[in-house]
């Protein structure tokens, strides 16, 4: 773990995230916490990580997500040399199946 991140304020934010009960609560909290662009950037990196683990090429990923090759490379480094956080989450997501119709996503158009 990066020791620069380990501080009380980060612990408190993670505790807040861990107390959220469902996707709707996540939308509400993160909409207040982040700008739209920050949240879209985070979700883009997660999508890039997903596609890299699926063996997609940089070109396929860039075309689908709009991510730059620099972003794709940075995510790739995290997958290969990071703290294994992506692997942890992907393993857990594979263990659960969330049907799309029950996902609770909101259309904010």
Image (tube, rainbow, N blue to C red):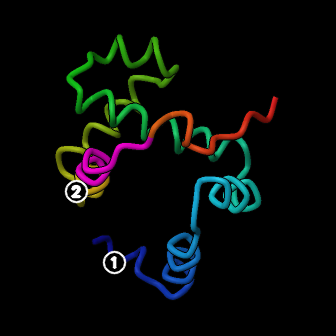
Above-or-below relation of 51 to 11 = above
Residue 77, disc: none
| x then y, percent, for residue 5 | 42, 74
Secondary structure, magenta segment, majority class: helix
Q: Where are the magenta residues, as a range?
A: 90-98
- Report x, y in % for residue 105: 64, 41
Nearest the camera: 80 or 64?
A: 64
- Residue 94 belongs to the span the image colors magenta: yes
Residue located at (51% from left, 34% from top): 100
The question of residue 80 being in magenta is answered with no
Quadrant assignment, res 92: bottom left
Q: Residue at x 52, y 40 (%)?
A: 43
Q: Is residue 89 above or below residue 57?
A: below
Q: Nearer the viewer, residue 104 or 68?
A: 104
- The mark nearer the N terminus, 1 or 2, is 1
Structural crowding at the residue carrying mark 1, measured as other residues with C-alpha within 10 Å and reported as few (<14), some (14–19) or many (≥20): few
Near mark 2 (Cα within 10 A), the count class, few <14, some 14-19 or many ≥20, is few
Left or right, residue 21 beside residue 48 = right
Q: Where is residue 85 in the image (x, y as percent from the top left)?
A: 29, 57
Q: How far apart are marks 1 and 2 (CA)?
A: 16 Å
Q: Residue 84 carries which label?
A: 2
Residue at point 40% right, 75% down? 4
The vertical placement of 109 against 6, above or below, is above
Helix, strand or loop under label 2: loop
Q: Can you say which quadrant of the picture contains the N terminus? A: bottom left
> Residue 10 at x, y = what percent?
52, 77
Q: What element carries label 1?
A: loop
Residue where numbered disc 1 is placed = 3
Residue at position x 39%, y 31% from top? 48
Q: Which of 49 and 73 is in front in this view?
A: 49
User: Considering the image in quadrants, where does the C terminus appear?
Assistant: top right
């Amino acid at each position: 773990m990066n020791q620069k991140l380990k501080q009380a304020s980060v612990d408190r934010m993670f505790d807040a995230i861990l107390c959220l009960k469902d996707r709707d609560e996540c939308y509400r909290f993160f909409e207040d916490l982040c700008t739209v662009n920050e949240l879209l950037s985070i979700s883009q990196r997660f999508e890039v990580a997903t596609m890299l683990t699926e063996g997609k090429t940089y070109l396929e990923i860039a075309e689908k997500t709009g991510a730059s090759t620099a972003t794709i490379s940075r995510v790739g480094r995290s997958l290969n040399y990071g703290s294994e956080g992506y692997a942890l989450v992907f393993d857990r997501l594979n263990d659960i199946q969330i049907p799309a119709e029950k996902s609770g996503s909101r259309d904010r158009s």
